[in-house]
Amino acid sequence: MFQFFSNKMTELSDHYLDWSRVAILARSGNHVYSRDELMMRGRIAGATLASAFLGAYLNDSEYTYCGNLTMAIMTGAVGLAAAHLYESPSFHKRLWLSRECDSLKTDIAKQVGSLCSESGCFENLQEKVEQVVSAIMQISLSEGANGNATQTWGRRRFLLTKARENLDKTADEVRAFWLEGDVEEVLDKLDDRAIEDRRRFQLR
C-alpha cells in the first residue's frame, strides 16, 4: 500500500522527488551511511528543527488561527522539504534533465516551424509532433517499490532527442516518420519501450 502511495506522490511531483527512496530505506533498517551522508542528513535535520522552532516561536495565533504545535509541524515540514531539495544530488540531476527536456522541446518547435517555412507545412505535422511530445512528457517509469524518478527524466530526454533527430531529415523522410501512423506508432518508431511506459502510466 505504501508503495502505491509513494509512487503516486512521485508522479504528482512530476518525478522531481522520488518518494520510494523513503520506503526502501525505512524497510531496510540496516542501511550503513557514509560520513558525507550522515553530515547531509544532519544538516537536513537541523534545518527541520530550526524551522519548526521558529514557526512556533514567531507564531501569532490571532493571525494564523493555528496553535504553536500545528505551526511547528507545518513550518518543520516546509523546512524538511526545502533542505532535502537543496541537499539532494538526485534532485539537482532531475532538475538538470528537466531543463534539458525544455531545451529539446524548444528545438523541436523551431524545427517544425522551419520545416513549415521551407517546404510548406505538412498537414497535421505540428499537431502530431505536439501530441507525441506531450505523450513523452507523460511517461512514467514508477513501478512496484521503485519511483524511478531519475530514470523517468532520462527516458524523456532520450525520446525527445530521438524526436529532434527525426525532424532533421528530408521532407519525404519527415512525412513518412511522423505522419504515417498514430501517436503510439510514432512512439514505437522512436523506441519500442515507450509504448509500454506510456500504457503503464495510463493504467494508473
Image (cartoon, rainbow, N blue to C red):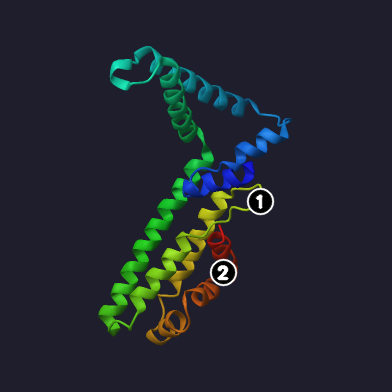
Q: Residues within 10 Å of mark 2 (few under 14, many from 20)?
A: many
Q: Which residue is painted at 35% across and 65% down in the image?
A: 107
Query: Which amino acid, mark 2?
Result: Ile
Disc 1 marks which residue? Answer: 144
Figure quadrant of residue 118 = bottom left
Q: What element does badge 2 sit on?
A: helix
For residue 189, above or below residue 199? below
144 vs 177, nearest the viewer: 144
Drawn side of residue 134 relative to residue 115, left or right: right
Given contact means CB atoms under 8 Å apart, are the residues at marks 1 and 2 in contact? no
122 versus 154 height, above or below:
below
Decide: few, some or many residues near mark 1? Use Cα within 10 Å; few <14, some 14-19, many ≥20: few
In the current view of this chain or complex, which residue is farthest to the right? 30
Say above or below: 137 vs 43: below
Q: Secondary structure at mark 1?
A: loop
Count of residue discs: 2
Residue at 64% across, 44% down: 1
Measured as percent of width and height from the top left, residue 41 is found at 57, 26
Q: Which residue is most to the top?
A: 57
- Residue that numbered label 2 is attached to: 195
Q: Give percent across and percent down for residue 199.
A: 56, 65
Mark 1 or mark 2: which comes first in sequence? 1
Q: Amino acid at mark 1?
A: Gly
**Quarter holding residue 188:** bottom right
Residue 179: x and y in percent read 42, 82
Disc marking residue 19? none
